[in-house]
Image (cartoon, helix red, strand yellow):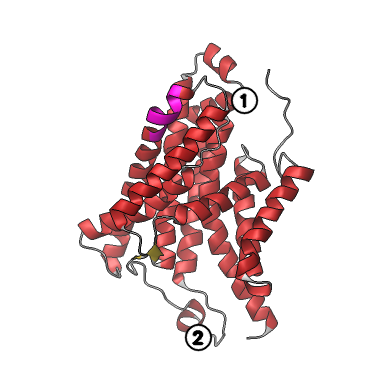
Amino acid sequence: MDWYEVLVQQTINGLTRGSVFALVALGYTMVYGIIELINFAHGDVFMLGLFVSLTYFTLLGMAKTLHGWELLTVLPLVFLATMLTTGLVNVTVDRLAYRPLRHAFRLAPLITAIGVSFMIENLALIWQGPAPVPYPDIFPSIDILREWFGVESLIFLTTKDLLVVGATIPLMIGLQYFITRTTWGKAMRATAQDRETALAMGIDVEKTILLTFFVGGALAGAAGLIQGLYYNIGQWYIGYQAGLRAFTAAVLGGIGNMPGAALGGLLIGFLSAWSDQYISARWTNAIVFSILILVLVFRPHGLLGERTPEKL
C-alpha cells in the first residue's frame, strides 16, 4: 500500500470509530448539561445496546446475513426496539440511583454512577459470560470500490462503513432538530441553563430530566448496535473503554455542548486510528488521555464550549 492509501484507509477507519464515539458522547454531554452529572454508567448502556440488539435478532430468528425485505424491515425494527430498551434502562437507572440524590452534594451521584457502572458490567458478565460473544454478520459487507465501481485499489471501503455514517448522521440531525425546534427540546435547554428559573416558568424539570436520560440511552443503544454490526463481536467490558473515549470526546468538544460532543467524537476517532497506524496501538490510550489532560489544563471549557460563571 502506498502512503496515501494507508492515510485514506485509516481516515475511513477513524470516521467509523468517531461516529460511534460521537453517539455515545452525546449522551454524556446531554446528561451533564441538564444535571451536571458525569454518568459513568453511560458506556455500559452502550454495551447493553450491543447485547440487547443481538438478543432481538436471535429471538426473531434473524441472526444471519440479511438481504432484501428482511434487511429493510428487520434491521430498522431492531434498531427502534434496541433504542427503546436502552432508553428505558437509562431512565430506570436515573429513577432508582440518581433521582434520590438529586439534592445531595455533588460527589454522591458521581460515586453512585461508578457503582452503577460496575453493577451493569457484572450483570452483563453473568448474562453473556466472560468470553467474547460473536455478533452475526447481519449487514452484508460489499467492497464498494471493486464491486460497484470496478476500481482496483487496496483501499477497503465497504457498505458497513456507509451504514455507520449513514445511521449516525440522521440521528445527530434528528437530535439537533429535537433540541432546537421542539417544545421538549427548548425545555431541556432551559433546564440546562437554569433549573430553578425553568421550574418557576412552569417547566416540569423532572420530566425533562427523564426525557434526557431516555434520549441519551437510546443513542447509546443505537451506537451499541452499530458497533455489533460493524465489528461482529462484543464483550461485557467494552463499555468501559468506549465510555472513557466518548467522555474524552465530550470534554474535548465542550461538555454540555452537543455539536462539540459530535466534533470531539470524530476527532478522537481520527486520532485513535492514526495513532494505531503511525505510532502503536499500545500508545493510543496514552495519547487520547494526554489530549484530555491538555484540554482540561489549557481549555477546560473544550473546543466549542463556552466559559460559564460558577452557579452560586
Q: Residue furthest top?
A: 200
In percent of width and height, residue 278 lies at 68, 74
Q: Which mark is residue 193?
A: 1
Q: Is residue 143 left or right of residue 267?
A: left
Element class at badge 1: helix
Name which of mark 1 and mark 2 comes first in the sequence.
2
Q: Nearer the viewer, mark 1 or mark 2?
A: 1
Q: Quadrant of residue 87?
A: top left
Q: Which residues are magenta?
A: 93-100
In percent of width and height, residue 134 lies at 34, 67
| Residue indicated by mark 2 | 150
In percent of width and height, residue 166 lies at 48, 59
Amino acid bearing label 2: Gly
Q: Residue at x 30, y 52 (%)?
A: 126
Amino acid bearing label 1: Gln
Residue placed most toward the observer, 54 or 187: 54
Q: Quadrant of the N terminus?
A: bottom right
Q: Quadrant of the C terminus?
A: top right
Q: Are marks 1 and 2 in contact (CB under 8 Å)?
A: no
10 Å neighbourhood of mark 1: few (<14), some, or many (≥20)? Answer: few
Q: Is residue 296 left or right of residue 115?
A: right
In percent of width and height, residue 44 lies at 43, 48
10 Å neighbourhood of mark 2: few (<14), some, or many (≥20)? Answer: few
Q: Residue at x 66, y 68 (%)?
A: 275
Q: Main secondary structure of the magenta part?
A: helix
Element class at badge 2: loop
Q: Is residue 288 left or right of residue 152?
A: right
